[in-house]
Image (tube, rainbow, N blue to C red):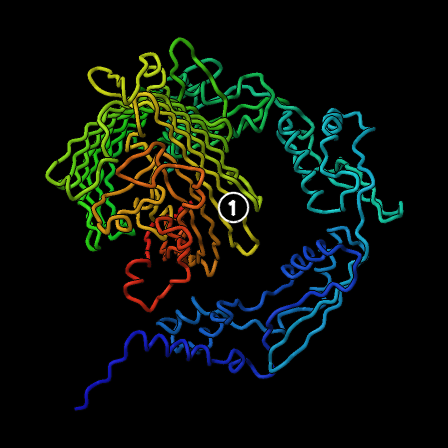
Amino acid sequence: MSPIPRISFLSFFISAIFALASCSNTKKLPQGASLYIGSEIKINDKDASKKQRKFLHNELADAVRPLPNKKIFGMRLKLRLYNFAGVPKEQKGFKHWLRSKVGEPPVLISSLSIPNNEKLLQNVLRNRGYFFNKVVGTTIEKKRKTNVYFDVVTGPQYKINQTNFLEDSPLQIAKDINAIASNTLLKKGAPYNLDLIKGERDRIDKALKEKGYYFFSPDYLYVEADTSIGNHLVDMTMRLKYDSIPENAYNVYRINDIYVYTNYQLNRANVDTSHANALSYQGLYIVDNRKKYRPFLFRDMLVFNKGAVYNRSEQNKSISRLINLNTFKFVKNRFETEGDTLLNAYYYLSAFPKKSLRFEIGANTQNDSRAGSELSVSWRNRNTFRAAEEFRVKLNSGFETQYTGIAKQPSIYTIGGEVGFTFPYFIVPFISPKTNSVVVPRTIINAKYSYESQQDLLRINSYKLSYGYNWKETVRKEHQLYPFNINYVKTDTFTKVASTATYANLLFNGLIIGPTYEFTYNSQVGSNSPDNYYFDGLADFSGIILGTVQGADYSSNPKMLLGQTFAQYAKFQTDFRYYHSYPNKNIWASRILIGAGVPFGNSNQLPNIKQFFSGGNSSLRGFRSRLVGPGTFNEKQLKGTTNYIQTLGDLKLEMNTEWRVDVYRFFKIGIFADAGNIWLYNDNPTFPGGKFSSKFLRELAADAGLGLRFDFKILLLRFDMAIPVRKPWLPEGNRWVHKQIDFSSPEWRSENLIFNLAIGYPF
């Protein structure tokens, strides 16, 4: 018997690709049918500006229906798969799945109506103010494939001459509309735009909801447009649909009684919503038969008061605050009329389980051939003192080891624990501050211990106690203030390895005492804009007052507190990001990170746990983690040895830019470049060339790379491959190394080809 030939998966894959590529999209079409392959818009006049024509071209092209078969990498792959599968004999099996679930049937030209699309495009143009447009569609067929061409003459675009409101109406609602007329979106000189008219109706409706018109709707408004005044101008008049507006839409409603049900169950058919046993507390009726919550919690969360005019912003704010407590998994709200102008408010709350236990296990890899794992167990009580306070306990352990590579680094083992309280309100000595922001403020108390052992090298014990506040000014602006932080670090070293390892930059024994403040702004929250920004700023201080009062000096007069030295520094860090989204879902993302730590008085450098590092899968991706800098320092280049652990610095500059391409559903591609470095504030003989100077721009490292991303919504896996293009430790004039790229060289690949595996985007 002759041996069975073996076909590798790669050979099979290549064969399948060639088979799909050679498969004709038109071969299996019905007799006389033609494949619709797309449309083209031609704007043949210049009444619209070049910018307007470009915008109209895209909008008109998107409006044509039906859409042609989708293209992937230039091929109508789904159609090819549909044809490749053929007609399955049964409504099951691989062929049926490939044809019906993955494949896509051909879109025939017979399914496209030229007259209907002409009318559709004319309407699109009229909605943009081109009232006297002309659209003519034609088809061109070649080899059973048909293109559709639409010749468009836009004509002049009409612009707004003036906008009139309900000036002659005696109704109060008309007066309230007139009172906000100056903020109209329909400005004189603006092009006529149907979307703008809809936006104006929504603006008025939103404003009226703030004034108590609970039953009003934007559908009760319409705009009359008069184009008879000439010169391509139009007069706009906002009117009410008096014939179709219900009586209650004219009324301003006030809040009457407010009821809170604390034990509403979604999975119960009959839920008791009576309020016979409700507790009356400061204008609220609270139904809490099990006494699980203290009444002041709901008074603080609900910004409504009895007798107040209904306000939709306050309604939404109250719901958001209840949800933001993280105590209730479901919050439902409804209003019920009481008489002609009163509303009773009802809030139905379903709680999370009060206590929960959570296990987490994970694995991680670094681009310097390190891998590890981490295990954590956490327990929390969501309602510790009956006012949505959270008490949490967390234990964690992990390890990280290097499985290959020349520069062998020690294995790291960690263990730690954390205990903390979070209160959904401010706890400030002597005062009781209140806030009615959308997100409830929090007071946070934390105690944390961590132990780290770097094999045969050193052991670090860290104890930290902190007290602070977290609050959001708006949904986009967040503040974190910790006026009290105390961190005690004790490091034990092993002198037997002193001759083979450099770890002087990792040593700090003593206290870190001082406040921190962090501000975050994120314009992406609730934004539909293509341009968005993210900013995070951090200020971190230690020993400022204490060291100044004592006259501490690191070299001549070091001071101690409770028998321990203490760090004295001021540290600032800013992280600014810019995102631009394109209509095809592609994104250009950029980041600049600047960090500066200034040690003085009692310190010569920042404590190692406060210093910056560079390199790694969320930093300079073409360099191994924590091995860039400081400055022009490089152990291997300087001494020809690899006796280092990691390098840290007091200052940092980093710039990243990335083009994120949406390829197909969950599959994306990233093309990126990174540049940056770290520096020391003061000279350190262990790291020659590491001090910051006016030549810092000449000392930037840079890399470039390509990444594959798999975005499964709840998880994003990132595979980035990068190479260094600039190495700051080389002599000036030789630092750009892009001309030395040699993918055919195993030695070059081993030294320069850096692979990063990570979860989530780097920024």
Give the quarter of the image for residue 186.
top right
Q: Amino acid at mark 1?
A: Tyr
Toward the left, the furthest residue is 496
The answer to which of 340 and 80 lies nearer the viewer is: 80
Residue 635: percent from the left, percent from the top? 26, 47
- Vertical placement of residue 85 versus 483, above or below: below
Residue at 51%, 54% (x, y): give it.
Answer: 586
Q: Is residue 638 left or right of residue 217?
A: left
Label 1, on which residue? 579
Residue 674: percent from the left, percent from the top? 42, 49
Residue 185: percent from the left, percent from the top? 71, 38
Q: Is residue 602 left or right of residue 301?
A: left
Q: Which structural element holds mark 1?
A: strand
Quadrant in the picture for the C terminus: top left
Q: Neighbour class for label 1 at 10 Å: few (<14), some, many (≥20)?
A: some
Q: Is residue 427 left or right of residue 56?
A: left
- Vertical placement of residue 12 versus 704, above or below: below
- Vertical placement of residue 477 versus 4, above or below: above
Residue 414: percent from the left, percent from the top? 19, 38
Quadrant in the picture for the N terminus: bottom left
Give the quarter of the image for residue 633.
top left
The answer to which of 694 and 432 lies nearer the viewer is: 694
The answer to which of 218 and 84 lies nearer the viewer is: 84
Q: Is residue 339 visible?
A: no
Toward the top, the furthest residue is 430
Residue at 26%, 50% (x, y): give it.
Answer: 636
Toward the bottom, the furthest residue is 1
